[in-house]
Image: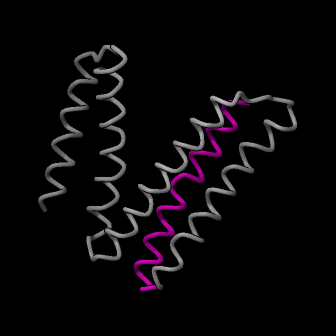
């Protein structure tokens, strides 16, 4: 079951960001962004929540609270990405910085806060990712 859920996430995760590029590229009004993202997040909730409901999975209050916090932060990141695109920052800069920056942040927090060990290849990847984000930000 987890593999199916991960596949759903993989296939749908990039679609909201793709839509933000379409909204910016077609110069649609800013008032379209929030409803657009709300539909995507609601669809994500249904696509993950429905299988859980059908299997009788019960969530604790803590899980619901953390899920809500992460959803709000994710939505804020998507809206910030949309604002950058609307401000004229090219998509080839916005998307790698947003995606790469997120991966870099997760790797660093895992290592610094949770004591996850980074081997040489992982460390090289984190350093390369950091340099890529910096180079894209200055270009």
Is 70 in the magenta?
no
Q: How many labels, in total?
A: 0
Tell which of 88 and 79 is nearer to you.
79
For the point 44% across and 85% down, which residue is it? 26
Q: What stretch is highlighted in magenta?
A: 1-28
Is the image coloured rainbow, by chain, by secondary structure, or in one colour? one colour
Quadrant position of residue 68: top right
With respect to residue 114, does 139 lie above or below? Answer: below
Q: Position of residue 109 (x, y in %)?
A: 33, 28
With respect to residue 90, does 3 lie above or below? Answer: above
Q: In this view, does 89 lie to the left or right of 14?
A: left
Q: Is residue 81 left or right of residue 18?
A: left
With respect to residue 17, does 10 lie above or below? Answer: above
Is 8 in the magenta?
yes
Q: Is the magenta stretch mostly helix, strand or loop?
A: helix
For the point 35% across and 76% down, which residue is it? 86
With respect to residue 112, does 125 lie above or below? Answer: below
For the point 66% across and 32% down, which residue is it? 3
Q: Position of residue 94 (x, y in %)?
A: 30, 61
For the point 62% across and 60% down, which residue is it? 40
Q: Where is residue 19 in the image (x, y as percent from the top left)?
A: 51, 69
Q: In this view, does 100 lie to the left or right of 136?
A: right
**Screen quadrant of the C terminus:** bottom left
Q: Where is residue 13 in the image (x, y as percent from the top left)?
A: 54, 52
**Screen quadrant of the N terminus:** top right
Tell which of 113 and 46 is nearer to you.
113
Quadrant position of residue 89: bottom left
């Amino acid at each position: 079951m987890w593999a199916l859920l991960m596949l759903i996430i993989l296939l749908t995760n990039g679609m909201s960001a793709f839509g933000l590029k379409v909204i910016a590229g077609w110069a649609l009004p800013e008032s379209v962004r929030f409803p657009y993202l709300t539909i995507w997040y609601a669809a994500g909730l249904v696509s993950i929540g429905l299988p859980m409901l059908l299997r009788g999975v019960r969530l604790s209050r803590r899980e619901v609270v953390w899920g809500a916090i992460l959803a709000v932060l994710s939505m804020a990141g998507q809206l910030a990405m949309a604002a950058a695109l609307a401000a004229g920052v090219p998509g080839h800069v916005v998307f790698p910085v947003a995606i790469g920056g997120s991966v870099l942040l997760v790797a660093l927090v895992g290592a610094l806060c949770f004591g996850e060990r980074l081997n040489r290849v992982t460390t090289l990847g984190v350093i390369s990712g950091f340099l890529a984000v910096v180079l894209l930000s200055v270009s």
